[in-house]
Amino acid sequence: MTESSGSPIAVLGLGAMGRALASAFLEGGHRVAVWNRTPGKETELVAAGATAAATAGEAVRASRLVVVCLLDHTSVHDVLDPLAADLAGRAVVNLTSTAPNEARELAAWAERHGIDYLDGGIMATPPMIGRPGSSLLYSGSKTVFEEHTPALKLMGTADYFGEDAGLASLYDFALLSGMYLMFAGFTHGAAMVRSAGVSAAEFAERAVPWITAMAQTIPMATAAIDSGDYTTDVQSLDFNKAAVDAIVRASRDAGVGLDVIAPVKALIDRQVADGHGAEAFDRIFEGIRPLTPSPVR
Ligand code: FVH
């Protein structure tokens, strides 16, 4: 069974993201009850047709679907714990960023209280919500995902990863790790060229197409990482060690801190010291992977 387009939805938490989510539901034709701990953030939503609930419980009782977008795991418990009885039999979609084990803990809490729980990770900024490029990842209750897919799709693309409630945030945080390291790498490069008076804006004109082109080569690394066979006849770890050592020297000469590049050098050096210099760069995976990784599915 899927919900009707005008069905009521409660949105708990009206930070920048919660407001964007509530707007998307309103634009999609839903009746939306909104609540925030601190009053005042609901004004524009109410003008657009939302109902301001005096309490979180009031918003919950008006809706079968409850979307939660708060600061963190603790704030989710702060808000939901007193409402466990009201939430029983309803669907909670928690889009608050939580670590995977925190999402699993919330799913177990919800199960104990008869609440249908779907966890989600938002791969978008508030202005992107409901627009092309907005992607949301889900895991947990398949029933909730299937029943509410039309509403979920109002926020962005909706992908379901399985019953393990921690999987969506595992993907979320893994993707964010890549993003943070990419931005950190850009700032390192920007610091290097600043020594020659080049602005970050000018550097970005070169960096964006370069990083975009390099991102296209990521799939070439996956076979080695997934199989554990790092044999290569191009750009071995020895080759990369020479390159990164030169970047370290150039950074030092330019007066740039090594905080971003040093961990990359350390990962390469470790593999080379262990006798893997002839193998591919992707072997640095072996230096950081879980000691007992799950088999590749
Ligand atoms: N904004 C973004 O770009 C990112 C994109 C990816 C996903 N994140 C996550 O979304 C969650 C909410 O983010 P946000 O941008 O809405 O955050 P804030 O604007 O800081 O709003 C936080 C709301 O949480 C409320 N809150 C905090 N602590 C409590 C509490 N103990 N009890 C009740 N509510 C609480 C806060 O209320 P108030 O301060 O206005 O009273 C805001 O409504 C977050 O997990 C991101 O990581 C967004």
Image: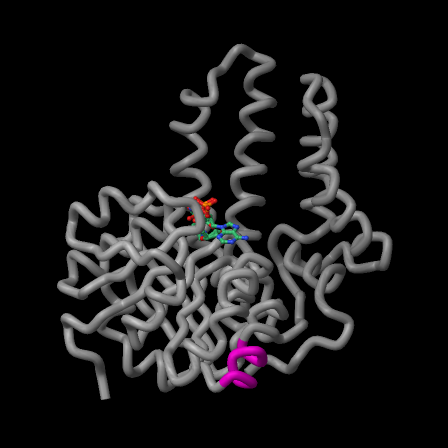
Seen at 28% across and 77% down, the residue is 148
Residue 131 to residue 66: above or below: above
Q: Nearer the viewer, residue 215 or 68?
A: 68
Image quadrant of residue 121? bottom left
Seen at 50% across and 67% down, the residue is 80
Q: Position of residue 43 (x, y in %)?
A: 25, 43
Q: Position of residue 146 (x, y in %)?
A: 31, 82
Seen at 56% across and 16% down, the residue is 194
Q: Nearer the viewer, residue 43 or 150?
A: 43
Residue located farthest toward the bottom when viewing the structure as drawn? 1
Image quadrant of residue 53? bottom left
The total number of labels drawn is 0
Residue 9 to residue 148: above or below: above
Tell whether position 109 is magenta.
Answer: yes
The residues colored magenta run 107-113
Q: Position of residue 294 (x, y in %)?
A: 66, 80
Report the side of 246 relative to 135 (left or right): right
Seen at 75% across and 76% down, the residue is 292
Report the side of 119 relative to 292 (left or right): left
Residue 66 to residue 249: above or below: below
Tell whether position 57 is magenta.
Answer: no
The quadrant of the rendering that contains the C terminus is: bottom right
Residue located farthest toward the front when viewing the structure as drawn? 54
Q: Nearer the viewer, residue 165 or 66?
A: 66
Task: Inspect this view and state whether residue 161 appears.
Answer: no
Q: Position of residue 252 (x, y in %)?
A: 74, 22
The quadrant of the rendering that contains the N terminus is: bottom left
Task: Inspect this view and state whether residue 88 appears.
Answer: yes
Q: Nearer the viewer, residue 39 or 287?
A: 39
Report the side of 146 relative to 282 (left or right): left
The dominant secondary structure in magenta is helix
Coloring applied to the structure: one colour
